[in-house]
Amino acid sequence: MKGSGRTRMAWAAICALSLTATAALNTATTGSVGAASTRHSASMGMLSASQCAANKAAGTITYVSPFGFDASAGIIDVFAAEKLGYFADMCLNVGFVTNATDVNELVSSGKAQVTNEGSAADTLQAIASGAHMVGIETSGNTSDYAVITNRSITSLKELDGKTLGYYSILPVAIREMLTAAGVNIATVKLIADTNYNPTQVVQGTLQGLQAYQSNQVITLGAANKPFNEFTPQQFGITGTYNVMTVNATFLSRHRQSVADFMRADLRALHYCIKYPSACVTIEGGYAKAAGAPFTSSHENSVWALERKLTLSSSLPGQGLGVQTNAEWKPESNALKRYRLVTTVPKLTSAEDVTLVAGLYKGKTLVWP
């Protein structure tokens, strides 16, 4: 997942899928991922001629995956929307980048248009640091973060004076966990980790490590490695996970095209929730075409957990992906409380709460 909070690319040894390789990838995988790969044509007349023309005129919408071919919410659905022809139905041309290390820079500069951040807090921190983007969809009102520790650490309080690895920026949710557990954060030896290898806590190289419930926890569990896991939920800490973000200028100039991008993506999300293994197979087909590693058993476990998170933590009475200022407010307050940014961006400008909400009638996604 992703951006400043979810970039986990080194651990997965992700390979490239460049902007120019998108057409070749589609050709290579068409018809190779089974019955779920049904494609549609924009000639079916799903949109008005004027909107179809406007979407084509918007040009290629480039999606930058912050974690390659991970079967996570916000990634698996974008690949599925492409393969199932939903973007084509919306007269959209979508390109993919799967190996970028400067995700926010690409989107902020306008060289790409769409990516994901790990949470509302991650998004707000990126914007506070100058990223020119807006959050348009939030997958769930919960956190996917975790802290994993050596088996000898039985409470977070025991991290006082010990080492804790983190990726890029220590997430707000983890700071809140440590505070709730009574940890004296000033005594914790925070170490910026660059190899994303969770076995470090098993080997004792690190006593604690920032992790994702849907990644490192699954990896260690599958390998039957001894470790302890602590989650925000155990401490009553709310959060968010997977925020879809878009270049702010592109959104202002092509708002309906962005809405149609999300309409196609959310249709694919609903499909992937109903047919989870089919979507993992679709993404695996893209990974194979790009020469990237893809372990189906692991990715099926990743999507099983994130599928559950998405279904269990959507806002009451709202469609999947709908977000509100109130949902982001706790993380905004936490950024201010811990003084992690000089100025916390205003929620009214950092997130668009009407774009995805406008795609639903009640909890039903409107598909033209």
Image: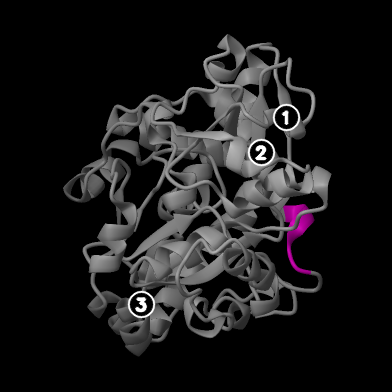
Give x and y (percent) for residue 95. 28, 56
Residue under pointer 3: 248
Amino acid type, mark 3: Ala
Tell me which numbered mark, 2 or 1, is placed earlier along the sequence. 2
Amino acid type, mark 1: Glu
Separation of marks 3 and 2 at Cα, in angstroms: 30 Å
- Residue 46, visible in the rendered structure: no
Residue at x 37%, y 65% (from the top left corner): 129
Establish if 298 lies above or below 316. above
Q: Are marks 2 and 1 in contact (CB under 8 Å)?
A: yes
Establish if 6 lies above or below 51. above
Tell me which numbered mark, 1 or 3, is placed earlier along the sequence. 1
Q: Would you say the magenta stretch is mainly helix, strand or loop? A: helix
Establish if 345 lies above or below 64. below
Most foreground residue, 27 or 358: 358
Most foreground residue, 325 or 287: 325
Tell me which numbered mark, 3 or 2, is placed earlier along the sequence. 2
- Residue 130, visible in the rendered structure: yes
Write down the region rendered in magenta: 311-315
Establish if 91 lies above or below 311. below
Give x and y (percent) for residue 183. 72, 40
Q: Residue 146 has which mark?
A: 2
Would residue 253 be counted in the magenta stretch?
A: no
Separation of marks 1 and 3 at Cα, in angstroms: 37 Å
Amino acid type, mark 2: Ala
Mark 3 or 2, closer to the camera: 2
Residue under pointer 1: 229
Q: Secondary structure at mark 3?
A: helix
Separation of marks 2 and 1 at Cα, in angstroms: 7 Å
Would residue 313 be counted in the magenta stretch?
A: yes
Most foreground residue, 217 or 344: 344
Residue at x 63%, y 66% (from the top left corner): 337
